[in-house]
Image (tube, rainbow, N blue to C red):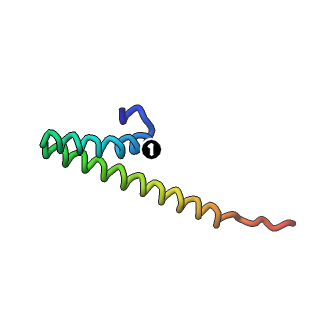
């Protein structure tokens, strides 16, 4: 699934499925599954937040770098 989807939808899917799988691991008492899904969830959230910060930073750079062309 991760190969076929673009980056942002994949991260959103990981952020949604991570907690679901963690709960499943808690029910099954499988420590490896809990830790793996916790890592996936944290990675997805951090990646989404960093993408948002980069997008806002690039937007601010574009707004500030509008060159004013003198009329000649």
Left or right for 61, reference 48: right
Spot occupied by residue 67 in the image (x, y as percentages of width and height): 71, 65
| Residue at the right extreme of this rendering | 72
**Above or below, comparing residue 24 to residue 71 in the picture:** above
Quadrant position of residue 14: top left
Question: Relative to 49, does residue 23 appear above or below in the rendering?
Answer: above
Could you tell me residue 37's position as x and y percent?
24, 45
Viewer-side residue, 53 vs 22 = 22
Q: Residue at x 13, y 42 (%)?
A: 30
Q: To which residue does mark 1 refer?
A: 8
Identify the image quadrant of the C terminus.
bottom right
- Residue 68 as seen in the image, left or right of residue 25: right
Residue 25 or residue 53, whichever sits in front: 25
The residue at the point 85 percent across, 66 percent down is 71
Image spot of residue 25 (x, y percent): 18, 42
Say which element carries label 1: helix
Left or right of residue 28: residue 22: right
Q: In which quadrant of the rendered image does the N terminus lie? A: top left
- The location of residue 29, given as percent across then percent down, is 12, 43
- The residue lying at 78 percent from left, 65 percent from top is 69
Could you classify mark 1 by the number of other residues whose Cα lies within 10 Å: few (under 14), some (14-19), or many (20 or more)?
few
Q: Nearer the viewer, residue 38 or 46?
A: 38
Residue 39 horizontal side relative to residue 69, left or right: left
Q: Nearer the viewer, residue 61 or 68?
A: 61
Q: Say how many tags the image has.
A: 1
Q: Residue at x 42, y 57 (%)?
A: 50
């Amino acid at each position: 699934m991760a190969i076929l989807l673009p980056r942002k939808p994949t991260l959103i899917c990981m952020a949604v499925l991570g907690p679901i799988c963690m709960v499943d691991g808690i029910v099954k008492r499988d420590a490896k599954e809990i830790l793996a899904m916790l890592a996936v969830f944290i990675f997805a959230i951090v990646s989404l937040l960093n993408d948002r910060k980069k997008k806002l930073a690039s937007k601010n750079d574009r707004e500030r770098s509008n060159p004013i062309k003198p009329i000649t």
